[in-house]
């Protein structure tokens, strides 16, 4: 009888060990799959975030390019700089894009029957955190299509399409939304902002081209730490905490000289 009881206890012990062993094997299969699924979802949302940032920068670059009548007026380096300026400063450098923000390549071309549309594409590669079938990255492409603001030639009041003497002698000059002088040259340095990053700790010693000090911008200005980066324009009088501030953007408007003949002419390009 005692031998029978010992045999039963031994069988129970063996079954318990078998169950423990089977649970260990199942866990070794399930846990890696679980962690892989979690990592996949996190990386998926990271890619969506990057695509949102790139898409917003493409939109701002398209608006910049639409102001010009022809793509030939904008060279590729200028377009690339405008695109990079609209990107977030640090988010893409540590993102899933191979090469960071500098790993994005722009392609610009014209389309449409009259070539009045432009297509801007951002091409980059997304890193894969885990090598799958010896693939370390996948190619991605985001495209924006916009129309050039080229306007159209207007006829005179007679409707015969022949320019009058007044129209021939009319001169187009350039002004800004907040300026008080007109410019004869669209590429005047006063119309092109020269933006410079500087430590907030050094803002008291900084001077603009007229020798004036920089004050806080009413739009984006806020209390800064000494090691924070702010942005100044060489011909401005405000410092800015964001490159996206409207105070760092200048809209150039072409207008007839007859409409601003009472304004002063720019001393630099006049």
Image (cartoon, rainbow, N blue to C red):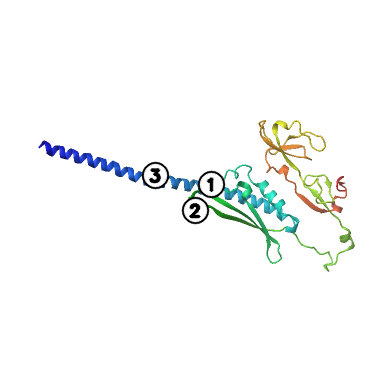
Image quarter (top left, top right, bottom left or bottom right) of the N terminus: top left
Report how far apart the C-alphas of labels 3 and 2 lie in the structure. 23 Å
> In front: mark 3 or mark 1?
3
Disc 2 designates what residue?
134
Mark 3 secondary-structure assignment? helix
> Between 35 and 66, which is closer to the camera in this rendering?
35
At horizontal 29% and vertical 42% (from top left) the residue drawn is: 21
Q: Position of residue 264 (x, y in %)?
A: 87, 45
Tell me where residue 109 appears, x and y as whole percent.
Answer: 68, 60
Residue in the picture at 78% in, 51% down: 253
Task: Report, in whole angstroms, how far the alpha carbon at label 1 lies from the one at label 2.
Answer: 22 Å
Q: Position of residue 242 (x, y in %)?
A: 67, 40
Q: Residue furthest bottom?
A: 160
Q: In the rendered structure, which disc, 3 or 1, sits on the residue that comes first in sequence?
A: 3
Q: Are marks 3 and 1 in contact (CB under 8 Å)?
A: no
Given contact means CB atoms under 8 Å apart, are the residues at marks 3 and 2 in contact? Answer: no
In this view, the residue in front, 199 or 65, is 199
Residue at the extreme left: 1
Vertical placement of residue 241 versus 124, above or below: above
Secondary structure of residue under mark 1: helix
Instruction: Residue 238: name its quadrant.
Output: top right
| Residue farthest toward the front in the current orientation of the protein | 134
Tag in front: 3 or 2 = 2
**Where does label 3 land, which residue?**
31
Q: Residues within 10 Å of mark 2 (few under 14, many from 20)?
A: few
Label 3 Cα neighbours within 10 Å, binned few <14 / some 14-19 / many ≥20: few
Q: Label 1: which residue?
A: 46
Q: Earlier in the sequence, mark 3 or mark 2?
A: 3
Is 89 positioned to the left or the right of 29 in the image? right
Q: Position of residue 13 (x, y in %)?
A: 22, 39
Q: Quadrant of residue 32?
A: top left
């Amino acid at each position: 009888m005692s031998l029978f009881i010992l045999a039963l206890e031994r069988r129970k012990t063996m079954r318990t060990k078998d169950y423990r062993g089977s649970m260990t094997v199942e866990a070794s299969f399930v846990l890696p799959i679980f962690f892989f699924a979690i990592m996949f979802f996190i990386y998926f949302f990271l890619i969506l975030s990057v695509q949102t940032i790139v898409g917003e920068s493409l939109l701002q670059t398209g608006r910049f390019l639409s102001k010009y009548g022809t793509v030939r007026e904008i060279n590729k380096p200028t377009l690339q700089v405008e695109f990079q300026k609209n990107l977030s400063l640090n988010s893409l450098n540590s993102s899933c894009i191979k090469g960071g923000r500098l790993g994005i390549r722009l392609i610009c071309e014209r389309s449409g029957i009259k070539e009045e549309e432009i297509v801007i594409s951002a091409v980059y590669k997304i890193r894969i955190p885990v090598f799958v079938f010896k693939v370390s990255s996948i190619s991605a492409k985001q495209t924006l299509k916009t129309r050039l603001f080229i306007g159209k030639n207007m006829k005179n009041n007679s409707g015969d399409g022949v320019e009058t003497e007044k129209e021939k002698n009319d001169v187009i000059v350039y002004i800004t939304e907040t300026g008080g002088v007109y410019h004869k040259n669209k590429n005047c340095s006063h119309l092109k902002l020269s933006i410079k990053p500087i430590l907030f700790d050094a803002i008291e010693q900084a001077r603009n081209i007229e020798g004036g000090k920089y004050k806080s911008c009413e739009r984006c200005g806020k209390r800064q730490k000494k090691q924070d980066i702010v942005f100044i324009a060489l011909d401005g009088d405000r410092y800015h905490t964001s490159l996206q501030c409207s105070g760092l953007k200048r809209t150039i408007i072409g207008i007839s000289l007859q409409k601003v003949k009472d304004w002063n002419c720019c001393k630099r390009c006049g």
